[in-house]
């Protein structure tokens, strides 16, 4: 019986992006468009068991995360769950990675919040249009365009989004109210009000509505048609965050609540402890006693589903206060019950002030029609390739474009906002031992069951608990080490030979520059996007000196000496690194090229 890795590898031809020409009706072509046909005939009971465990683990993670990410997107909580199940079913048929899970993510939710003005109709239409663009890119085999997005741009955007998302949840974590949405004003008001936190318990008796406030800078973010016709139902929502869209029993004005702060910090601490336990749980061996294996299984289950465990714990505490008539927390509030209706996306919006046409909606979203599809593709394919390299199989970038594009198009029929591959849930999927994309079916069914039977219980989930889930989910995305790496690379490019981590031959660099000037600028991008990299960089254990007409960087890293045969342009960075790392693992540390550059301290 072939392994799941081998079966998944049959779903696409060998070679990244260089598929052999096959007839459109051949079995290989059909399997390439429907990868499920490659692994389903070999499906076994063992795979079923592993996929069930992985699907349940991801399901316990995605339900609380979906509710929390809807808050980041500025949408009602149920829209997070509406966006969490369609990708599971579509990827079951079209996905080429066994690990990837599609659904709402923190970065995509932030983009949706920025380009849709917290209006569900705009978010659903953006999902439909993004899916159409992604499908077109997949059919036209335009996946290579993502290679031109450089590594520093990706890391810079991810780090900035992490800071924005995490700091944006401080107000919910600490129970602060009347915090502006603009980042700098948000930082100022948060630090100003954090010292005023006091314990405020709210009676379950309803209070009057909030008084209207004069908001400075109101309407600055929205486009003219949206301001003129929609007025956002309550214009202060563009800058000020109310207690809830349906406050229920928590109406009234509250700006300082110690109960939310205590609960939020406790939830963060519990999530951190459970994560550390998950990272340090030793693997289970068959020779262990049954009691030890059972205890390991319980610890593994609790730590893997830590988000659901902590959110349930917080909801139970809030419900106990609700019964006593003394509520110190801000709750999520009423959530629409039942499954979402199946309907076409809204191509116009009618309000009491008039109608916003499809053209005006597209103009309002503006650059979001380009940014959201590209970032969704980039995030999903980066996740797929990362875990594919760890698992020893390959993914088809163009097929991944089709999978995520169809997910967004079909998802818009059930009121989903744009989704992409989730790194955190994909890691849970891989660590749970998933064998095929069938694990997504279990996750999708669990989300549907939650929508149909558990939405009434979501009312009691404190917003501070969801804020803790979001902060702990986005914290690993902020990579502090990358800034030092990029600074050293910048220094090495400006001053070749000075940096202790990267050494280059100035003569070789000058030769390459002269050669580039002869060939002209037109030949650069096509040839330099994927430059040829000789395998091994040189004979292991021997000296190697490159020719005069090539770039000869001596990467003084515990790895490989790479000699690029063409100029290296922006898009080649990720692909070149992906090609060099396997060689670095196979070969011992190379010796310094003779006479090329001074000795590097990293090489001994």
Image: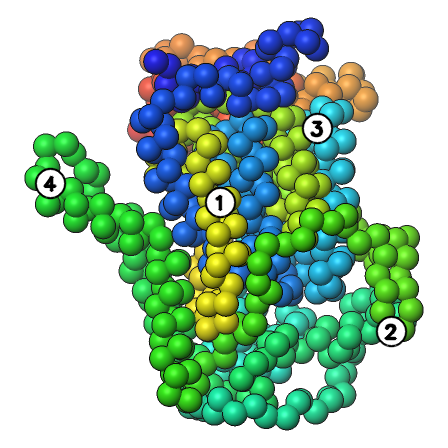
Which residue is depicted at the point 35% across and 60% down? 309
Residue highlighted by disc 1: 445
| Mark-to-mark CA distance, 3 and 4 | 50 Å
Horizontal and vertical percent position of residue 576: 55, 25
For residue 303, the mark is none
Number of the front mark, 3 or 4: 4
> Which quadrant holds the C terminus?
top left
For residue 352, the mark is 2
Q: Crowding near pointer 4: few (<14 within 10 Å), some, many (20+)?
A: few
Secondary structure found at label 2: loop
Q: Quadrant of residue 52?
A: top left
Residue highlighted by disc 3: 138
Q: Is residue 190 left or right of residue 136?
A: left
Question: Which of pointers 2 and 3 lies earlier in the amino acid sequence?
Answer: 3
Residue highlighted by disc 4: 290
Question: Which of pointers 4 and 2 lies earlier in the amino acid sequence?
Answer: 4
Secondary structure found at label 4: helix
Question: Which of pointers 2 and 1 lies earlier in the amino acid sequence?
Answer: 2
**Foreground residue, 186 or 513?**
186
Disc 1 + disc 3, Cβ < 8 Å: no
Q: Is residue 67 above or below residue 378?
A: below
Secondary structure found at label 1: helix
**Foreground residue, 82 or 163?**
82
Horizontal and vertical percent position of residue 101: 51, 40
| Mark-to-mark CA distance, 2 and 3 | 40 Å
Question: Which of pointers 1 and 4 lies earlier in the amino acid sequence?
Answer: 4
Which residue is depicted at the point 19% across and 38% down? 284
Q: Is residue 489 above or below residue 22?
A: below
Q: Is residue 209 above or below residue 440?
A: below
């Amino acid at each position: 019986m072939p392994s799941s890795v081998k079966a998944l590898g049959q779903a696409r031809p060998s070679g990244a992006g260089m598929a052999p020409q096959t007839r459109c009706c051949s079995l290989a072509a059909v399997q390439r468009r429907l990868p499920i046909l490659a692994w389903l005939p070999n499906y076994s009971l063992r795979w079923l068991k592993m996929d069930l465990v992985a699907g349940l683990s991801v399901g316990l993670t995605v339900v609380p995360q979906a509710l929390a990410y809807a808050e980041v997107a500025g949408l009602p909580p149920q829209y997070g769950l509406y966006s969490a199940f369609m990708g599971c079913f579509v990827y079951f048929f079209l996905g080429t990675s066994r690990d990837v899970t599609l659904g709402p993510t923190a970065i995509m939710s932030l983009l949706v919040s920025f380009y849709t003005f917290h209006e569900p109709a705009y978010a659903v239409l953006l999902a439909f249009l993004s899916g159409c663009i992604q499908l077109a890119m997949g059919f036209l085999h335009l996946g290579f365009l993502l290679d031109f997005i450089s590594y520093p741009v990706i890391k810079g955007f991810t780090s900035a989004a992490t800071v924005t998302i995490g700091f944006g949840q401080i107000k919910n974590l600490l129970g602060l109210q009347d915090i502006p949405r603009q980042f700098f004003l948000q930082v100022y008001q948060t630090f100003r009000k954090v010292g005023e936190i006091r314990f405020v318990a709210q009676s379950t008796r309803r209070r009057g509505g909030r008084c209207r406030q004069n908001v400075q800078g109101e309407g600055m973010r929205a486009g003219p048609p949206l301001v003129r016709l929609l007025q956002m139902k309550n214009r202060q929502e563009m800058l000020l965050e109310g207690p809830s869209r349906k406050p229920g029993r928590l109406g009234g004005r509250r700006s300082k609540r110690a109960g939310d702060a205590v609960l939020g910090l406790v939830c963060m601490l519990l999530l951190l402890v459970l994560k550390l336990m998950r990272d340090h749980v030793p693997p289970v061996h068959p020779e262990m006693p049954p009691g030890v294996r059972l205890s390991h299984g319980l610890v593994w289950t609790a730590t893997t589903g830590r988000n659901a465990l902590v959110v349930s714990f917080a909801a139970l505490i809030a419900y106990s206060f609700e019964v006593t008539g003394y509520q110190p927390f801000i709750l999520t509030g009423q959530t629409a019950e039942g499954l979402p209706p199946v309907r076409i996306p809204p191509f116009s919006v009618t309000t009491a002030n008039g109608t916003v046409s499809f053209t005006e909606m597209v103009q309002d979203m503006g650059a979001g029609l380009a940014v959201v599809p590209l970032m969704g593709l980039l995030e999903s394919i980066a996740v797929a390739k990362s875990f594919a390299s760890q698992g020893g199989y390959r993914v088809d970038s163009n097929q991944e474009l089709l999978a995520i594009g169809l997910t967004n198009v079909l998802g818009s029929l059930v009121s989903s906002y744009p989704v992409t591959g989730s790194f955190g849930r994909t890691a849970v999927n891989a660590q749970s031992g998933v064998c095929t994309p069938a694990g997504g079916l279990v996750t999708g069914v669990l989300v549907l069951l939650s929508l149909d039977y558990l939405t009434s219980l979501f009312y009691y989930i404190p917003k501070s608990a969801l804020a803790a889930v979001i902060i702990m989910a986005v914290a690993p995305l902020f990579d502090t080490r990358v800034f030092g790496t990029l600074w050293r690379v910048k220094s090495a490019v400006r001053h070749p030979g000075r940096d202790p981590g990267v050494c280059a031959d100035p003569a070789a660099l000058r030769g390459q520059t002269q050669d580039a000037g002869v060939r002209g600028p037109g030949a650069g991008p096509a040839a330099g996007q994927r430059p040829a990299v000789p395998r091994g960089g040189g004979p292991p254990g021997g000296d190697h000196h490159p020719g005069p007409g090539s770039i000869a960087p001596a990467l003084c890293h515990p790895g490989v000496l790479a000699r690029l045969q063409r100029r290296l342009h922006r898009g080649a960075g990720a692909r070149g690194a992906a090609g060099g790392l396997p060689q670095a693992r196979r070969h011992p540390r190379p010796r310094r090229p003779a006479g090329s550059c001074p000795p590097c301290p990293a090489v001994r």
